[in-house]
Image (spheres, rainbow, N blue to C red):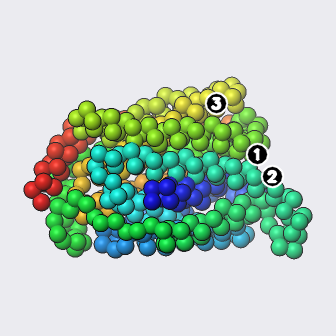
Amino acid sequence: MTVLLLVAYAFAIVDRIIIGLLVDDIKTDLGVTDTQIGILQGFAFAILYTLAAIPVGVLVDRWNRVKLLTIGIGVWSVMTIVSGFARSFGGLFVSRIGVGLGEATVTPASSSLISDYFPPEKRQQAYGVFLVGGAIGAGMAYLLGGFAIAIGGPMQEWFPTLLGGFSTWHITFILVGLPGLLIALLMLFTVREPVRRERATATQKFSFDAILRQYRRHPIAYAATYVGAVLNIAIVYAQLGWVPTAFIRLYDWTPTQIATVLSMVSVPCAVISALSAGWFLSWFLKRGRTDGPILVAAMQGGVWAIFGTLKFMMPTGELAMFFHAMTALTGSMGVAAALAGISQITPNELRGQFTAIYALLTGLVSVTAGSFIVGYLSDNLFPGTRGVGMSLSTVYFAFGVLAFVALFIGRRDFQAATVHARQWVNKG
């Protein structure tokens, strides 16, 4: 089950970030700016990804999660394929909206399934394994993008009638969207719906009052968890969206070269990040530290504020790639910590909805702001070929420091919320 969730998450990441490898080709074909590319990477994807978060969270807590995730995978895969037929900014914008709608299911449904497939002592590591899918997805995006760029021309020669009117970036979207349809079928016919664990009450009725009551018990704990996640994930989306372009513009690397190197460097680093996040969370838990999710998330913010800021100030692409590897080693920690933290301080029947709030906030702010701010700064504050590097450094430093500070402000209330959650479940 966890393996299939991992694969599904991997292809969600592929469909989400593949556009980052195709920036300059899309700009040339459609005549758009860096700011508009930032909108396609962020706001277009985030509209329904965000608006669907709460309804999806309710469905996660009340309906069959396997069926819900199957539908989501099908929707985002079809809309990725549709992106391969876009001929204007508006057409690509609409298809990206559809991708966001489908992907609104993946985090709440998968997180809830994992929490019921594994007991608490094994759950932290299961989240880490699940997040390996993000690393695999990023690597697949780079590899498939590089592969499509390399074979796009030959494919058009082999199938002139079918592909003659398509650019390489069109073909790339079609290629990465098709496998998701098979994954949806596998999900539907091979994964069972588990029994729900750790219910504090028997009711499943949705109520905003229940959410507000839970939030008001420990508002600082929830606020710190959400703010830290929003800022950390905004940094990640800025990186996913613009790092390939930065290497192309600053160091004259070709798209195929950067795709190959990023897949070789980012994937093992991201896998280590995902697995080590689960290991750190379990390590803190075994030693009685109830603030483990806060500490792990703060670690990511601090690392990115230091190594990320320096990355594109390096004189060579090789040195920049070394600093990229340093940041990639913590790239999954914020997500793993946020999901584990929400699960740790929230009863079962509210987890889907609180995870959906996490998805709403990260979609509304992180996905939108991360890519958009870099594009906007590149067009307006740091124009020129080196501007995207300075824009990324600005986002890395500002968001990393703010995440670190916010998480430590909420650390003590998070510890108290953990104690309260355990007492509540025992009484229930």
Disc 1/disc 3 C-alpha distance (Å): 17 Å
Residue 33 in the image, given as x and y percentages of width and height = 67, 54
Q: Which residue is mark 2?
A: 150
* Quarter occupied by residue 124: top left
Confirm or deny contact between disc 2 and disc 1 (CB under 8 A): yes
Disc 2/disc 1 C-alpha distance (Å): 7 Å
Q: Nearer the viewer, residue 4 or 18?
A: 4
Confirm or deny contact between disc 1 and disc 3 (CB under 8 A): no
Q: Is residue 394 visible?
A: no
Amino acid on which disc 2 is placed: Ala
* Quarter occupied by residue 414: top left
Q: Is residue 378 above or below residue 306?
A: below
Judge the density around disc 3: few (<14), some (14-19), many (≥20) Cα neighbours within 10 Å. some
Residue 320 - label: 3
Q: Secondary structure at mark 3?
A: helix
Q: Nearer the viewer, residue 346 or 39?
A: 346
Question: Which mark is in front, 2 or 3?
Answer: 2
Q: Quadrant of the C terminus?
A: bottom left
The mark that comes first in sequence, 2 or 1, is 2
